[in-house]
Amino acid sequence: MLMCRLLSSFSLALITLSSIPAGLDGCNDPQPICGARAPGDVVIGIMLPCHRKVALQQRIRPESFQCSDFDLVSFMRSLATIHEIDEINAAGFLPGVRLGYLMCDTCSFASKALGDVAYMLEGNGTLNVRCNYTDFRPEVKIILGALNSDESVALAGLLNVYMVPLLSSASSTPKLSDKLRFASFMRTIPSDKHQSKAVAKLMNHYDWNWVGVVYGDDEYGLAAFQRFLMDAEANNVCLAYQEALPHYLGNPQTPQRIKEVAEQIRSSNAKVVLLILMSDLVESLFQEMIKTNTSRIWIATDAWSRSGPTAKMDGINKVGDILGFTFASGKSDTFEKYLKNLTATPGGYNYFIEEYKNLRFNCTPECYTQTPPSYCSTPELLKIKSANACNFTDPQEQNDDYLVNAVDTSQAFLHKVAVQAVANALKKLLKCNSSSCLGERNFPPWKLLEELKKVDFNYDNQNFSFDVNGDFASFYELIMWKTDGEYRKVHQIGKYSVHDGKIEINVRDTFWLSTANTTNPQSRCSERCAPGTVKKILNASCCYNCIPCVEGTYSDEWDLENCITCALGTWSVKNRTTCSPIQEAYMKWRDPHPIVMMAAAAFGVLLLLVTLIIFLVYRDSPPMKRAEVRLSCVMMAGLSVSFASVICFMGKPNVHFCRARQVMYAMGFTLCVSCILVKAFRTFLAFLPFGQLTSRQLHKLYHPPAIVIIVTTLQGIICLLWMIFDSPHVDSPSQQSLIQLIQCNEGQTYIGFGIMLSYIALLALIGFLLAIKGRKVPQEVSETGYIIFSMLMYLFVWVCFIPVYITNSENGTAVQVSAILVSSYGIIFCHFLPKCYEALWGSKTNTMEKILRKWQSMRKSPVQSSPNFDSVAGIAIDIPGKKTHSHKNDRMSISSTSTILRHLETQSPINLTDSDLDIMDVSNKKLNAYLRLGTQIRKRSISF
């Protein structure tokens, strides 16, 4: 029995020794190049960094790389890959076939990764120079990795020679989608071209158009930045600044550049910063931000969006809001149980687990002194140390749940998916059924690549397959770092679909530290331009002034660059968001102003009708006789036509109304004024002194019907010529406006309109001057006062009308109608209503004697000598309505007018010895006054 035990132990030792590869030439390291291994029928290579950097500044010869700074997150990723391989083996997914692995630490450095892959391919002595590698059969059939795009680009270029598949779960640079250069590269994540679109759409969603960008100068950073520039422009996002950092933390220039970039971020007014960096660079930059309490909104890319060490930095809550995109994730209970009981795969070894347990459970109190030894870890790694480390005798025998709590295990999801993809491809390639796999196990790697491109499988209730570029086209998770005590915790708030390019955000789960509520923070170069305004670009497309849209244009959205022209039949005023249908403006029948004017015109016609009735009823009364009923009726007819012309000013204008209204007013008012002119001329002839020759000549001109006809006919000729040569028409406004003024244009030159009005004004002025001459004649025997006032009113109204009409052309129609009504009412109130009053309620006791003596008492200038009666013999006055001795009824005959005026001017009493004044009985309504001066009688008669 003892012998059997010895033989068994010896056999196990041989197996263990055979599993450890021999050192290569020149390798004196106590550990092999690759730190983890497990034997198997098909070996899978794993290229992930368990350390963050190598000591480049000490490398002057092609010696082995010295790695430092243990990386917990990458270590956890590698463990997830190993665990999934063990799970597939345990489940018997490939019957009769055991998967092995060989894991090398790239130390986040491409050159180190190239050395490792050379070791993997040469492991069984098959890496020889050949012209054709079709039958190249290395031990490692596929490599899972690398983590960074820089490493993957270098590895994919080399593996493209041998067509060994390289399957990455983290390298997202779009360059790797080029199948001509990287034919053997595939990945379980989308290309970064989708992530840059997602970031740009996220900024557009939150209306952030003024952002800063900090990127690494590696393949990942440069490609992502260039792609983001194009997507940012498409989403109206502008860059306030762009800064590049050395991608490798061990670069001597990195600390100084981080300080410069931090100062740029602090000095800029951009509140949003996109960081296309590795997590170690982000941590260094955040340390600078924390020193000055600089708060910003940080957009994380997949390279650090789930970085556990960054989330647990001291003072991380001071940097502000952090959100970003990450790949599909998911937790696994079996994997977390595995992390709590870390051991190497049976039959293999894992020096990375040993290193982790030494960091966690090895007692090193000297490392916490003021001058720690050189072999001690960095202060950050010392935080890994368990509080009970010094209580353990063998660190390798210890386990706890620290890894589960310290890192986000959901980040390992796609690494597990990568192992599943390889297993499904092997199942096809090895022709596996439920009991065995019949295919050749030592196959060329390119055959596995062919099957890998065609896999389509389900895992964790999700479907996975590769597109033509060898990428997974699924979705991104949108995450936000929420506060968790003094640290941060990743929380999903939405997702971005690669297929349709839509972003979904759960607004209720979004609490911003910047605003202390759910209100979205702002990061803009200029304030948004509200509808009704557009942007006037300054030095950048996102920096602008807001200017209002001019008339005839509008903007109905925020931040438009150009105003939209109004459609035909619509218009807008300045600074409007819509165009409204053009409204036609004219004197509408239903509007208050036209209604008032029409009521005034109708009342004027009604007043004229009442006046006409009174005149006809009381036509034999002295006031009516003096007003001359027939002439007054003609005046009323003219005023009625003037009032009727107001109708043509109402409603929508047309060419016929435009012409009719002016002709009606011109002819009607001219007819009226011509009658007033006759009255003024009559008084002028009857009561003013002239020589015999002058008197005869002026009396020959006094023919009332002829005067009225000639004066009115001249106006008709003026209107006729006006209608022929410069006819009024409907004005078509050349300038667009929201309200289109439809009105009559009184001709191209307005000459006809001006002559027509000037002609009436001339008649009124002549009548006014004639009435002024006889202003001292008693009102009882003349109408000079009424004529003066009415003509003065007319002239005043139309003199005011001209400047108002010129300066306020849009209201010209209303102004002219008002002028017509005022001047017409002026004549009614000055000429007709007083006569009506006298006829109805006036005094009937005024005799001619009283009238003449009243007139004589008004004269003020005494005359030294008696008037000369030689030239004039006598005068006989017949009062209208009275029977006289020598004249017909309804006549008034005046002889020797000049003589009686001279008597009145001298204010001398009439000498009754030289002249006799006989006044007949007034009670009999007959008054014959004969003033006989001398013996010679020359009688002049003026009939009205």
Image (cartoon, rainbow, N blue to C red):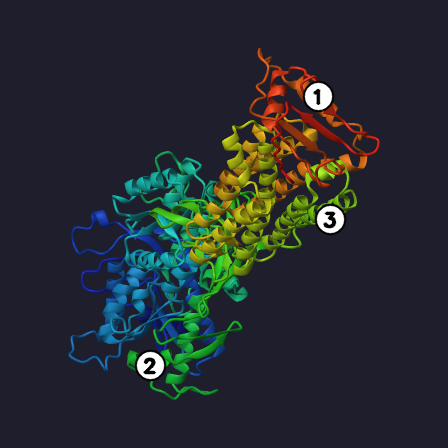
Q: Is residue 312 visible?
A: no
Question: Crowding near pointer 1: few (<14 within 10 Å), some, many (20+)?
Answer: few
Residue 159 in the image: above or below residue 545 = below
Is the C-beta separation of discs 1 and 2 under 8 Å? no
Q: Earlier in the sequence, mark 1 or mark 3?
A: 3
Q: Secondary structure at mark 2?
A: helix
Q: Earlier in the sequence, mark 2 or mark 3?
A: 2
> Residue 66 appears at what percent x and percent y?
26, 52
| Front-most of residues 545 and 220 | 545
Residue 574 in the image: above or below residue 48 = above
Task: Name the image quarter holding the N terminus.
Answer: bottom left
> Residue 509 appears at what percent x and percent y?
57, 54
Disc marking residue 609: 3
- Between the C-alphas of marks 1 and 3, the distance is 35 Å
Question: Crowding near pointer 2: few (<14 within 10 Å), some, many (20+)?
Answer: some
Mark 1 — residue? 854
> Residue 904 appears at what percent x and percent y?
63, 20
Left or right, 244 with respect to 525, comes to left
Residue at the image point whose x is 54% and y is 60% from the top: 656
Disc marking residue 450: 2
Residue at the limit of the structure toward the right, as seen here? 923
Amino acid found under the numbered disc labelled 2: Glu
Is the C-beta separation of discs 1 and 3 under 8 Å? no
Q: Earlier in the sequence, mark 1 or mark 2?
A: 2
Viewer-side label of 1, 3: 1
